[in-house]
Image (tube, rainbow, N blue to C red):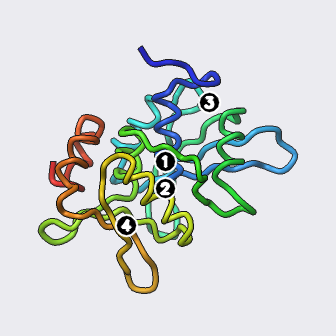
Amino acid sequence: MDNAVGSLTQTQKSIIIGSILGDGYLRVIKGRLNAFLEINHSIRQKEYVDWKYDRLKSITKSPPKQRESNGQRLAYRFFTEQHPVLTELWQRFYKKGVKTIPSDLVIDPLMLAVWFMDDGSKCRASDVYLNTQQFDDDSQGKLLFGLDKLGLKAKLNKDKNYYRIRFIKSSLPKLNDLIAKHVITSMRYKIGL
């Protein structure tokens, strides 16, 4: 049974936090009471967006829609309704308009799977990354700590001018064990599942 947490289920909350760690974006419109979440991916990730929508549709008004962005890129997105739990998360994850990681973040396997489906990648034969370049050093340290609490060893790896998280090869079986049941079919290529 999926327990409700402030009128959201734990599954919904984990998907939302996993999305915040990845490509999701919480916003508060001036003059409005609560925050809302935007889920926006490439049209090639339509199945993934539909998967997120199916689990969050109780807090949305309309299904995902295709749209043009950045000139030629086709995107597929939806927005949640404004919600008090999303406002609480916005207050925890955004400082002065910048996405940051709260010190008390506890990452669960579903959050990690969503974060990985958003921002994970596999390069070469066995290098597995989380593209965390948008986070500052302090936030990246908190993310490494959160991964360590799950039994995953990772370190920061320089990618041009920024750093991202690279999993230590010995942690890859544990990573697969934690996220495999949550990763949808169209995203399994990211980790070689």
Q: Is residue 104 left or right of residue 35?
A: left
What residue sits right under mark 3 in the picture? 61
Residue type at numbered disc 3? Lys
What residue sits right under mark 2 in the picture? 23
What residue sits right under mark 1 in the picture? 19
**Tag on residue 165?**
4
Q: Which residue is at the front of the view, 157 or 67?
A: 157
Circle 4: element type: strand
Q: CA distance from mark 4 to mark 3?
A: 35 Å
Is label 2 in contact with label 4 (beta carbons under 8 Å)?
Answer: no
Circle 3: element type: loop
| Earlier-in-chain disc, 2 versus 4 | 2
Is label 1 in contact with label 2 (beta carbons under 8 Å)?
Answer: yes
Tell me residue 161's x, y (percent): 45, 85
Rate crowding at label 4 as few (under 14), some (14 to 19) or many (20 or more) other CA atoms within 10 Å.
many
Rate crowding at label 1 as few (under 14), some (14 to 19) or many (20 or more) other CA atoms within 10 Å.
many
